[in-house]
Image (tube, grey):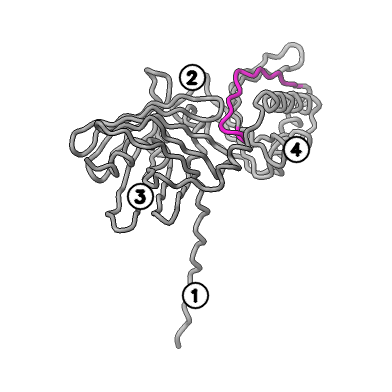
Amino acid sequence: MKNSTFLTSCLVHGFLAVVLQDHVTAQEDGARTAKADNTAAEKAIRASVDNFAKAYNSHDAKAVADLFLPEAQIVDEADNTIQGRESIQHLFTEVFAEQPDTGIAIEIESIRFIGTSLAVETGSTTTVPPAGQESESGRYSVLHILQDGKWSMGLVRDIPAEPSHRDHLEALAWLVGDWVDESVDGRVHTSCRWADNDSFLLQEVTVRRADQEVIKVSQRIGWDPLRKQFKAWTFDSEGGYGESQWIPTETGWLIKATSVNTDGSTASATNHVELIGMDRYVFQSVDRVSGNELLPAVKVIVVRQPPQPQELESTPVPTK
């Protein structure tokens, strides 16, 4: 039985093909001390929502925009995007000019924390128009981000009454991009992107260790409409395959993973993921069993890889 196959295709469904079993960085101390009081955080977020309603009903576009991060986005149901605090202020200035006597009422449905610095709020809005006019209702999701000790809105998205698979996957949209876990023992690179009409997140993982063949893992993450939760399907370059069920927790995700190794033996593990900012998360894997072998626990910190600088195109020198 090849433990590398098990480790890549089963233990890290959805996040990282961990083969560096003893790789625990000094960043763990920061992760342990970074845990925030969710009760106080939820109170701060609810106060921010109240401030939004007050600013909206006062038709104060600047006060509304100040509740957003400088690089924040607002996305409507048609995927039209407004980005940047200045553009958001301009948007609400136009809205208030078109509807000078209309207010808004907001009802929060849920606030769920992802790690210590991110929270996803879902809720509904109802316009309060002048007498004699009909009100309009809608649903929304907001990604709140803790930055410099303050909770601000980072992404606001209008969602339909019946959420699509993309709407559900917004809770994992922070995964999109490139991630890396690297030590003296090797390097694991993970690239994540939207796929198939944004109904899935597709992850491609490359594992490199000294004196060993490169292992590649492909994983598809989607919304299971039967279980009403996230599910992932994984295949690796050695012939192993597996699946996992994801359950949200107060600090992140609990992932129950099972797989089949290349020799036909089965494996299972319980994984925990805690986000500690948009660019870093803690991954832990416990209760790891491959065939009849009990494997040691794994804990690593994974960081987002910054985009590579684009190469400047050289200007051809004209010839006579």
Report the Cα–Cα distance between label 4 and label 2: 31 Å
Residue at the image point whose x is 45% and y is 24% from the top:
247
Q: Amino acid at mark 3?
A: Thr
- Under tag 3, what secondary structure? strand
Quarter of the figure with residue 209: bottom left
Give the overall secondary structure of the magenta segment: strand
- Under tag 2, what secondary structure? loop
Report the Cα–Cα distance between label 1 and label 2: 52 Å
Where is residue 266? Give x, y as percent: 24, 31
Residue, disc 4:
66
- Label 4 packing within 10 angstroms: few (<14), some (14-19), many (20+): some
Which residue in the rendered view is the most extreme toward the left? 263
Report the Cα–Cα distance between label 2 and label 3: 36 Å
What quarter of the picture does the C terminus occupy? bottom left
What quarter of the picture does the N terminus occupy? top left
Q: Are marks 2 and 3 in contact (CB under 8 Å)?
A: no
- Residue 22, above or below 241: below
Q: Are marks 1 and 3 in contact (CB under 8 Å)?
A: no
Residue 126 or 72: which is nearer the viewer?
Answer: 72
Q: Amino acid at mark 2?
A: Glu
Residue, disc 3:
206
